[in-house]
Image: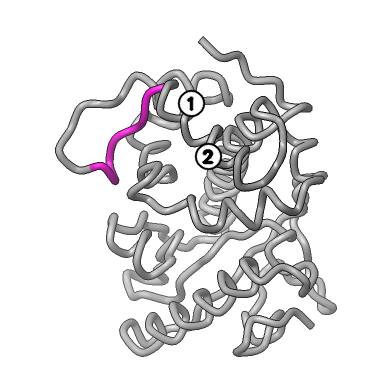
Amino acid sequence: MYKIDESKCRETEEFPELSRNWYYMKGTKNFGTVSYLYKKYECPNNYQDFYNCYTADTIGDDVKTIGRTENYLQHQAELLSINSQQPLTTCFDFIIKKLFIDTLDGQKKEIEVKELLENKGYQVKEPTYIQDTQEGIDKLVYKDDKLFCLIQVKPLSFFCGNSKSDLINDRKLAVEKEKLCIEKYKVPVFYLIYNNRTKKWVTNNKGNKAHRLNTLINENGISY
């Protein structure tokens, strides 16, 4: 059983070619819907437990709602190694970071968001599988039993830099999903952003934690 070394996994972010090739591998058909699986496994507290649950959960008809074997992940690392010209161990650590470290970090911040909003008197509901995967909704926020807004939680790295085409494509997708949500639900979408390293919330120039997407990027996915 592979043992996660968090520091080694985080170091793999230094190789941009890994991120470029990961963009074409990372779909839910390849790895399942990992944020959904985190909740399916009753929110593991650490990366290793999350990994252990995922690699043991391999039976089911819907590939998007089950995990993958360690051998499968090893094979994906081999493909990434060939395409990126990086050592196999580095590629495996990179995949572990993307699937388990990044997901668990984000999910913990989502739990924090829920607590923050509930302490202010709002009601917070979890999205359905479709709302999560297709509409990009992390939380539905209600005030007096009426839908008030939608929340998306993102790491600061999502909005940093304009040199990575895969990141810009992801931002364009975020713009499309926001338009879809506003049209469908008739409420605003707010982004809460956390610093990847410090895990602290990023505030705007007014000191607010909630950001509007059009103040962060333009419609072409370019960060301001």
Q: Which mark is residue 50?
A: 1
Q: Which amino acid type is marked by label 1?
A: Phe
Bounds of the magenta span? 63-69
**Residue positioned 56% across, 14% down in the render:** 2
Q: Does residue 67 show up magenta in the picture? A: yes
Tell me, yes or no, whether the two marked residues, 1 and 2, touch with CB atoms within 8 Å.
no
x and y, in percent, of residue 119 in the image:
56, 53
**Residue positioned 77% across, 53% down in the render:** 195
x and y, in percent, of residue 165 in the image:
66, 71
Q: Does residue 79 show up magenta in the picture? A: no
Relative placement, left or right, of 150 versus 83 is: left
Q: Nearer the viewer, residue 21 or 49?
A: 21
Graded by Cα atoms within 10 Å as few (under 14), some (14 to 19) or many (20 or more), the crowding at tag 2 reads some
Q: Secondary structure at mark 2?
A: helix
In the displayed orientation, state which residue is furthest to the left: 61
Relative placement, left or right, of 209 versus 152 is: right
Q: Is the residue 218 above or below the residue 132 in the image?
A: below
Q: Is the residue 172 above or below the residue 105 in the image?
A: below
x and y, in percent, of residue 137 in the image:
42, 65
Q: CA distance from mark 1 to mark 2?
A: 23 Å
Which one is earlier in the sequence, the residue at label 1 or at label 2? Answer: 1
Q: Which mark is residue 79?
A: 2
Q: Secondary structure at mark 1?
A: helix
- Tell me where residue 183 sits by quadrant: bottom left
Q: Is the residue 95 above or below the residue 25 in the image?
A: above
Relative placement, left or right, of 84 versus 8 is: left
Q: Which amino acid type is marked by label 2?
A: Leu
Q: Is the residue 179 above or below the residue 106 in the image?
A: below
